[in-house]
Amino acid sequence: MRQLTRYLLFTLFSTLLAAGAQAQQGGLSEQELRQMMQMAEYIGVDYSEAVRGGEVVNGDEYAEMQEFSRLIADNSARLQGSPEADAIRAEAEALQASIADRANLARVKAHTARLRHGLLSLSPALSLPRQLLDSAESEALYQQHCAACHGASGMGDGALAASLDPPPINFHDRERAENRSLLGLYDAISEGLDGTSMVAFDQLSEQQRWSLAFYVGGMAFEADTAAAKGTDLQLQDLVMYSPQVLRENNPEAPLESIAALRADPSPLFDKAARGGDRPIDTARSQLQKSLEAYQQGDYNSARTLAISAYLDGFELAESTLDSRDASLRRSIETDLLNLRARLNADSDPQQVEQQVTSVLERLDEAQALIEGSSLSDTSLFVASLIILLREGLEALLVVIALTTILIKSRRGDALKYVHIGWIAAFVAGFATWVAAQKLINISGASREVMEGVAAAAAAAVLFYVGYWMHSKTHAQEWQKYIQKNVDRSLTTGTLWGIAGLAFIAVYREIFETILFYQALLTQTSGGQYSALWGGVAAAAVLLAALGWAMVRYSARLPIGRFFSVTTVVLLALSFVLAGKAVAALQEAALISHSPIPVSFAFDWLGIYSTWEGIGVQAAILLAAGWLWLRGRRQLSANAAGA
């Protein structure tokens, strides 16, 4: 157990932070992915300066296009094997071949746009700016750092412009601005551009760099407040995609709206400050974009957007919808998860379109149900109580089990390690909530990866501890163990492992509880907060009473009975958490999702109708059955020997 707990301590937290990013990046660092996106965008913007009508018109520019396309192809070859990685590699090779053939601009732009789509889907969740500097501060920053090259008004005619090769960008060039994303501008400001006089301004703060990107990115456009308010675009869309790509992806968004938001993005920042769109709206928007990407043959982006429709949208409304129509919730959830497997070249486009249309209709029905009837004070109280009681019970069982094990082991002095674990989890949970609100944008996929990895780690450790405790079920064996091994086995490393397990069990539940309460708050009116907090308080009292009862009862149990009961509890928790781990990783699309013909879900038990989840839990049941049979044989052997 010492080796396992040391491994847990030294690797788990890095795994939690890196698993989602590494799985999504496919073997490349975030910086390398962003550089590839930047080069692809640069090729799409500047190719017309190198090749026209199939002829090279600027040798230096053409050489740069060839170099950038070679670098993109070389880096793409390092991506780990997956359908997304294969698509990116194929697109990179096609881009390199098109440039070698001096293809037309439309063909090259199509390749670069699909490349950026694919690379964005592999990139970690983008940390968007929460607030920009005001216009006067942004202009002053521009004049101080950019005007010498790009000119006081951004026309590319600064005092140093004549001596620079290539010349500085004219930010008022509308055609160029139409093909440049704000993310590309931000990366150029942050990292510089190789082969040009553009240096990295990494001495500036993140807010300053974002403010400069928005400032120069809006110079070619004119603000129109009315037009800017008439679109469903998100801040992330405006940042990640060029106006041209935004029009292709959102044909319902007028050109005037996109241009107005590039000139003045404040409406989108206001929306983000209010908490963005409603979850159902987000699900609907991402699902529509997924269908459009599928129809264009961009299957990688279609799957990514379908995943986002569930994780960043519908999942946040599930608890609210559950209180009104649980069957509708299950139906939408199942269809959203199953849709991903059909977003490929082998599926019938008509059937995919019909399935998306069906889900969209039921999302409208769900929205009508949610908006048509507000939660009563009683319903809000009960929902609030159940959320905390359900999430807190799993964590409480682990903490109580660890506590009583130490007490029975005559190591009450080591209880502080358990307390360190759960207290640290509360601090980390609060810090995560603050970070998600103020500093970073935790995507739905990253959230599910964190939950899935934490649940899998906890399930493995709980099963191991349950196995260990099963071997001490008989009082004679336990006394022998106490005499020979406790002081030696419960070393500092093992005790910190116990603290780590307490941390994981509690932190995972806190992380999930925060998400559910955030969704519940969107359905709470100003006069209902007393009902919501009353539910929280009632659940806390119930958990405290349950904890007290479990400690008191377990302390009175004989050694053999205590270990028998605790073994069952730990193995049951391992069973539940393993099922939840598989479900979370399936939702994040990190493992396959193969539904069983009969649909069912038992959230309390972590049982869901997929072959992967049922298979893992069946393996745990078989292992537990083997432990029980081995215990029975040992008991019979002891009786025969007596």
Image (cartoon, rainbow, N blue to C red):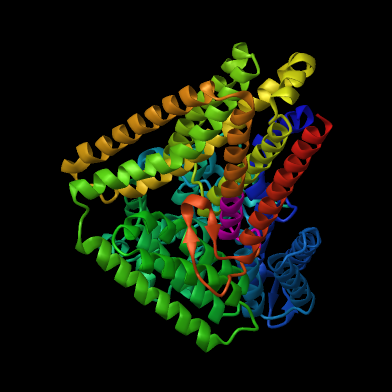
Locate the C terminus and report the quarter of the image it occupies.
top right
Horizontal relation, residue 545 to residue 41: left or right? left
User: In terms of depth relative to the viewer, which is nearer, 55 or 249?
Assistant: 249
Q: Residue furthest left?
A: 527
Q: Is residue 567 above or below residue 106?
A: above
Identify the residue at image location x=20%, y=36%. Answer: 530
**Residue 176, percent across and down?**
54, 65
User: For this view, does 53 lie left or right of residue 249?
Assistant: right
Residue 105 in the image: state x and y as whole percent.
64, 77
Residue at image location 28% in from the left, 38% down from the top: 535
> Residue 342: in sight, yes or no?
yes
Of 631 and 306, the residue lying toward us: 631
Q: Position of residue 179 (x, y in %)?
A: 54, 66
Q: Residue at x 58, y 55 (%)?
A: 184
Q: Is residue 573 magenta?
A: no
Foreground residue among 523 and 263 = 523
Magenta residue span: 578-591
From the viewer's side, name the closer residue of 333 and 213: 333
**Residue 385, image quadrant:** top left
> Would you place residue 170 above or below residue 470 in this image?
below
Q: How many marks?
A: 0
Q: The N terminus lies in which quarter of the figure? A: top right
Q: From the image, give the main secondary structure of the stretch colored magenta.
A: helix
Q: Residue at x 70, y 69 (%)?
A: 83
